[in-house]
Amino acid sequence: MVSRTRYRLKQHHKFEQDDQKYVADLETGDIVQINDIEWEILSRYESQTHHQIVEALKKEYKLTAIFDGIERLERLGKQGLLLHPAVENVGGFCRGVSSRSSHPYTDRKPKLLVPFHFTKEKSALDYITNLNRYQSLTHLAEFAELETLAFQEEKKEDAQDLNEVRVRNISSTKSDPLMPPWYAMDGYDGILLLSQFLTDDLPYYRIRDVPIVHCIEGDQRLQHVLLRTLLTLYAFQSSKDTLVVKASWMKAWLAELGVPVENVRVIPDGIDIVEPTGDKALAKQHTAAIFGKSMFVEKPAVGLISGFEPNRGAAWISEFARTHPHLAIFVYDAMLAQHYQHPPENVIIFSVDDEETRAVLPVFFQALDLVCFPAMPGTPLPIVLEAMAFGAPCIAMTKYGMPPEVIGAGVAVEAEWDNFGNFHVPMVKLSETINQWLHPSDARTQCQGFAKEIVQRYTRKNAAQALIQVFEEGFQRRTDNFRTPRALFPPIFCRRYEPDTGTLRSSVYRLGTNRYDHLETALAEVLTEGHTPAEVVSVFKHFQRDSSTPVCEITRAGNGFPNNNTETNPK
Amino acid sequence: MIGFPKILHQLHLFEEEGVPYAADLDKARVVELSAVMIDILKLAETQTDDAIVETLSTSYQEDDISEAFERFAELEREGLLFNRGEDLEWSLATESKWRKLLVAIPGINVDSFFDIETLSAGTNMALAHMIQHLTKYADLHFMGSRNRKITDGVYEVDIGIGDLVRLRSKIAETYYGILTLHQEQDRWLLPLYQYPEFPPILVQNHAPRGHGGQAINSMLRHYAAMRDYDGFTAPSDYVRDFYSQYVWDPSFFNTLPNGVDATLFKPMEKMVAKREIAAEVGDDRIEEVRTVGYLSRVQSEKGASVYLKLAELNPHLIFLIAGPNMGRYASRKLPDNLVYVGFHPRERLPLIYNAFDVYCFMSMSGEETFGLTVLEAMACGVPPIVPNFDGVPSVVGDAGLVADAENFNHDVATLVSYPCPVDFSEKINLLLDDAETWLAFSQRARKRAVAFTWDKTARRIVQLFEGLHQKKKLVNPNRLLNVFTSTQPSEDDEQQRLKYKSLVLSMNAHYERCLMRDAAYPMSVEDGVALSILKNHTTREAEAILAALIPDETQARTTLKRVRGLIDGTA
């Protein structure tokens, strides 16, 4: 959804005569009669944000009347009266949302709104993603001021500040006609959305000018809604907004589906660097002891960081285990750990569900000789990286080539999967690769070294910095929104009678030029006023009768609507 | 010199950044002034040019004063600052409860409406009658170039086409409606529909088709651009029915029948009339033989060629032609029984009609929606014969005969029908062969004609404006937000192509939550496009777009109805 154009007040003069209020635009020489609210709005327009204007006037006037007033003035602005569309020369956060109030910020941390329901229990893991949100925000707080919202209806004790995240109490309740965007409209340099549930956060996309970064987990539990979620979020984004996914294969997947990925960034969650607790032999002994499985001492240990669609994952793991009876297999899989009661003998399935189990994880990882993972949504990249932290090379089962995150530290085996969880990997090839890599070799030694380096790179601090960088970029792109051209010659969509045939066809007539124009061009133009380019492309793709023809530059498209492909595709 | 003292427009003088300005509230324009100009304006209403020069000569250079006079002269030519004509403020102020209509018919001399003799076209004649009767129900303010009273309740006001947009608030305050005329070559009206402020605009339409489709296309443009509370009038139901083929909402076409002055047009002793005409043209046959009449311009479009054939087919009757001249037919050898009776002023028309035993109306042009002469002939007790074509039969009802006509499914040149000479001929003889039949038709004709009064027409106009005000109350600016998005390919789609949908958000542009529960509801792309278009465009424009996008018209209409309902229901 595209932000609306922001306006700057022109040189004007307000006056009253015979109980009527007027404002004169001294640049065009026009006089516009205005009402009391518009009078008040004009007095504040230059120095206050919309939010401040509404806050200041809402006691005296009805909200809708205030919005109507702003809307009317901005409509006049669109016609060139009283307001100029503002093209701001923005450089960064320091001239951010508060630019019009001319605060002399030169160097400060950006202020981010993180509207997420944080629990007071700081060590608790998110029940969907098994992540500790609080922990990653702690790192983010080094680079940004963070604020979250607490609503009046929520319990009082929840509304205390967390250490790194300030809590702003909102006096209205959620059911108030003023939805979340309302209190988020003002004073933030960015909004960080963490919720994986669409309905929670969509309203924030209505906020103009403020870059939004939405972080999407490729979690297993979300797999059935993941694609839908991503596609929907993508539709909501304007050019200032960014979708952050946690692994490169998520982005590759979206690109494969035909979703443009300009505003998709890959920022793997950082990991806490784990210091080795002893040597590998010792770790293997501990692992064997903890699980009561001597195979971890006797056989080569292979880790499988899963993330499969559960039903098919269980089948695949059991096939994998049967094909590799000579291996001790350590599976990390959040859902199977819970539900897969009787895996094959040589398989241990494990998942972290609290800080205590998390604390023993490094022991298991240190026991591994090789880390295998399917590069697909559902596979938690941080776990892969943590597992590699002790130097185990990796085998990526991948559709999109070796994931950039682990290049140099292992090898890829080509795999296939589709949107419905079907996963295929040539088992023979996989076995060969595993067996080859379990033998000591120069390549293996090199990879072991590289695995450790990679782990150094994906720190929580780096992830936090990358996130801030994404906000900064979104802020730059924000300027694009001001350049939406307004129609000099407003289109009127109408039907056109053709006397030769006595039939009607739809067309568009332009005021000013007083002639008919291409319907598609005008439709694209009108849709662009309220929708992102991606949305407009969606509309045109939908109506393209022959889907094999690509949607080219729709604004240069030919006559009529796409009944005739030769016309819709510019040569 | 400029000719002070002068009445000034309503002015507000002010200074901004040291520059003096005058805000001309009558013209909604700001004019930059100089110090001397301000001082002159202070004296302008009371002193003469010389007195002003003398008063100011002590404070200003003579050059500056004369320069100021020159500048004032320029401004006056532009219609600014000085009241052109009488000060009409009293009429606006004292009768404020009395409804005022702004009559906007550019390019027509206002005075001609009050001097009917100067009018020839039926359209203008009808307008003139309508206007005269309308003054019983509302004051009429004709747009013009000066302020003056024309007659009781009729004024010319100093508002030009170029002033309309700037003065829209004032016009909205002052006028109950704007009455205008559809003229397909006019370009001034179409842009005005963009402004919600204007009071309802009622567009009189007299020519539903013709001119190679231009009339239909112009009408379709107006139909698309009009606000929900504007409308067309047309003299017969025919136009509404005609346009029902081309538009989805024929309610924009309202029947406004013409009237007839039944005290002027009345039956008289037929022999007296015939004798007088016979004497005038020097042809005794008029007294002796039964007569058929034609009163119109003598052109193909008006059926003159067919009328000639009728004369040839009926040598036993006399065929009279009344019209400005015989046009191109003058150089032909005409049938012996065809007699040109000349062109007559309005007050003599009853005499001409009374000299006809039957009246033939044979227009073939695409502009006949009513046939005012038919009604006048009927009022004189002359039974009419009209072709079965367009709006005319509905005027005749059972008071005349309807002859066959070949109606074309679309225009050919300027013709849209061909009246059948044989059938006309039979019907003429049918009426004239039997005195009793003739008498019955004659009496019915008079009885039916007197029911069409100009007073009814005038009252209907007021009623239509009232109806438009009702429609205005139903308008709501509800802008529900929506986005377009891709959606997951279905499992059986082998190519795994993305499909598209729209999501309607539970929120409008005012951040009000207008739907219960979910934040977003899925809808089809078609519905979404309708929703997006209706934010800033009319329902009729959405009609044109949906007609292009959805091949099945029934489905397209259903889509529009559903989305319109959603918008209005959540307002």
Image: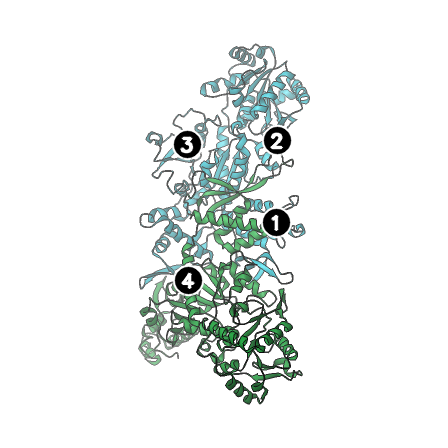
Chain colours: A cyan, B green
- Where residue B557 sits in the image (x, y, percent)? 54, 51
Left or right of A347? Residue B198 is: left
| Secondary structure state at the residue bearing disc 2 | loop
| Secondary structure state at the residue bearing disc 1 | loop
Using the image as rendered, state which of residue A180 and residue B318 is in the foreground.
Answer: B318
Residue contact at pointers 3 and 4, CB within 8 angstroms: no
Choose mark 2 or mark 3, whichever is in front: 2
Distance between the alpha carbons at the discs numbered 3 and 4: 51 Å
In primary-sequence order, the first of circles 2 and 3 is 3
Q: What amino acid type should be assigned to the residue bearing mark 4?
A: Pro
- Pointer 2 and pointer 3 on the same chain: yes
- Pointer 2 and pointer 1 on the same chain: yes
Residue contact at pointers 4 and 1, CB within 8 angstroms: no
- Pointer 4 and pointer 1 on the same chain: no
Q: Which residue is mark 3?
A: A117
Distance between the alpha carbons at the discs numbered 2 and 3: 33 Å
Mark sitting on residue B199? 4
Q: Which residue is mark 2?
A: A418
Left or right of A448? Residue B52 is: left
- Where residue B94 sits in the image (x, y, percent)? 31, 70
Q: What amino acid type should be assigned to the residue bearing mark 2?
A: Asp
| Secondary structure state at the residue bearing disc 4 | loop
